[in-house]
Image (cartoon, helix red, strand yellow):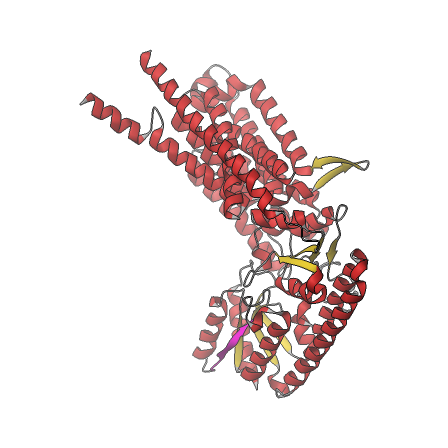
Amino acid sequence: MRKGYKTNSALRRFIMTIVFLTVTAIVTSACGDKATTGGSGKLNITATTGMITDVVQNVGGEYVEVSGLMGAGIDPHLYKASQGDVKKLDNADIIFYNGLHLEGKMAEMFEALEKRKPTVAVSEYLTEEQLHAAPGQGAGMHDPHIWFNVKLWISATEVIRDTLVEKDAAHADYYKEKADSYIKQLEELDTYAKEQIATIPEASRILVTAHDAFGYFGEAYGLTVTGLQGMNTMSEYGSKDVSKLRDYLVEKKIKAVFIESSVPKKSIESVIEGARQLGHEVKIGGELFSDAMGNAGTAEGTYIGMVRHNVDTIVAALK
Amino acid sequence: MSDFWILLTGALVASCCGVLGVFLVLRKMAMIGDAISHSVMPGIVIAFLLSGSRDSLLMMFAALLCGLLTTFLIQMFQQSGIQSDASIGVVFTALFAIGVVLVSLYARQVHLDQDAILYGEIAYVHWNIWELGGVNMGPKAVWLLGTTLLIISTVIGLFYKQFKLCAFDPALAAAIGIPVALFHYLLMGLVSMATVSSFESVGAILVVGLLIIPASTAYLLTDRLGLMIALSVAVGVASTFLGYGAAVLLDASIAGCMVCAAGFLFILAFLFSPSQGIIIKKLRIRKLA
């Protein structure tokens, strides 16, 4: 009997410890809140991918405060929100996202959020003809990697420009001017990419990567694109994919294949090894940025720098 | 406001899982949550292939059917003499593999897996609002989980004695005329309902964690079933609060922090539990010496 009483008092002490810890946690989280809200009179904007963040920064300039959710090297399919990201989305005046199911289930949340604050998909202006259907799918499923065709990304820039002009009419002229000069840069980039790719001999214009992100890029700049994995970076590639791709490399005498910043390179290495055993040397042509940009502060950390890097890497390896 | 809804959702998941987790731990079937998180895959794929849509209600329904099938098969294998851990392993790996094969055959180019289609994220619950005639009724997840919790507590409350006897001494229960198999299936049905609706609202890791860890913690603290359920729910709710506090401080994944907090509380109980804790045991031995 006495032992039972003792056990109960010890149990009570244990429960009190948990209660104490919990109360401490609530108090600290309540305090933590205040630090994150800062008003500076600027428009608070949150964007999902680094590419969108970069465009918003370029168009919004000094009148916007942009925060991105997915940093350098983060695969959007695998992104997990942190507590700070929740606050960023809560405090945002406008939210920009890619759309076309790039953000997965997050998109449902954006659609629900639309009723209460401007939540804009940058792919909004694109028409059915401009988009690629995701092969083998029902209606309404599109390849989301629109940033690889600079022309489509100009359309995304226009979405961002028009949204900013509408929500912050006081600085409309500023945004229009900034957008115009940025679009001009993008047009130059588009021309640059076309000219550079055109220097590759026509038979060698074949781009082999780990996953099918480069469909728009291939179409816009005249490359045949083949990927090992499907679009989805989560799905496993089958042994048939490996041998099919290997035979393709040997048959077309492809000189180089490419790895991607946000996809592990193991998958593509097995293909190279396979081709070597058949007596065909393939080298890794370099790392391409696909679903995420490079580190902030480097040239590849901007959209334009990233596209240039991809184009230069491809041209250097295939020429 | 977001903090409030996230904490409420977390507390609801913790309560659903806390109650059911105790029964699962007692029956040595704690991994069933993890099993369901994988075995819903073929349901999702088939529903997608048949309908061509990703409508979340439809997906949840398909997942629920798959969850029920999983628990039914596990229960059936176990009753025909296969060890419970083996029957869980057999059923969920086989079902998951069927899903993988279906994706590779028919849906290679589409982003199709539980993560993209079914699993929610606790960070987003407060934006996914249910509106009724233009009136803001609060997050959908809170309603879904609240209903689930209501059903669970009603069923367990009504048949508490039967569930208790089936968990501790199925032979005796059968001897006095309780339909043991029926109650096992009923419990499994509740588990698959609770896990699937929680997956839809908050994602997998949080559900699997809260189903096992708080119940195991409570198991270390008491021998009485009623108290064990109460403690399991309390530890679960405390984990969500502690975890959220940690997520704020660290700016990290909310669900991840909540499960870590549950793990931390388990370690505390493991070391300091008045009856089972290893430190208390050592002290007691020293006192005797």
Instruction: Classify B118 as above or below A77.
Output: above
User: Of residues A246 and B13, which is closer to you in this image?
Assistant: B13
- Res A98 visible: no
Query: Residue at the location (71% across, 60% down)?
Result: A63
Q: How many marks?
A: 0
Q: Position of residue B236 (x, y in %)?
A: 50, 32
Q: Position of residue B13 (x, y in %)?
A: 57, 34
Left or right for A197, reference B248: right
Q: Check if residue A282 falls in the magenta segment.
A: yes
Res. A20 in view: yes
The region drawn magenta spans A281-288
Residue at the extreme front: A40
In the image, residue B96 sits, relative to residue A162, either above or below, namely above
For the point 62% across and 58% down, the residue is A68
Q: Is residue A172 left or right of residue B228?
A: right
* Main SS class of the magenta portion in the image: strand
Q: Tell me what residue is drawn at x 53 percent, y 60 percent.
A: A236
Q: Is residue B103 magenta?
A: no
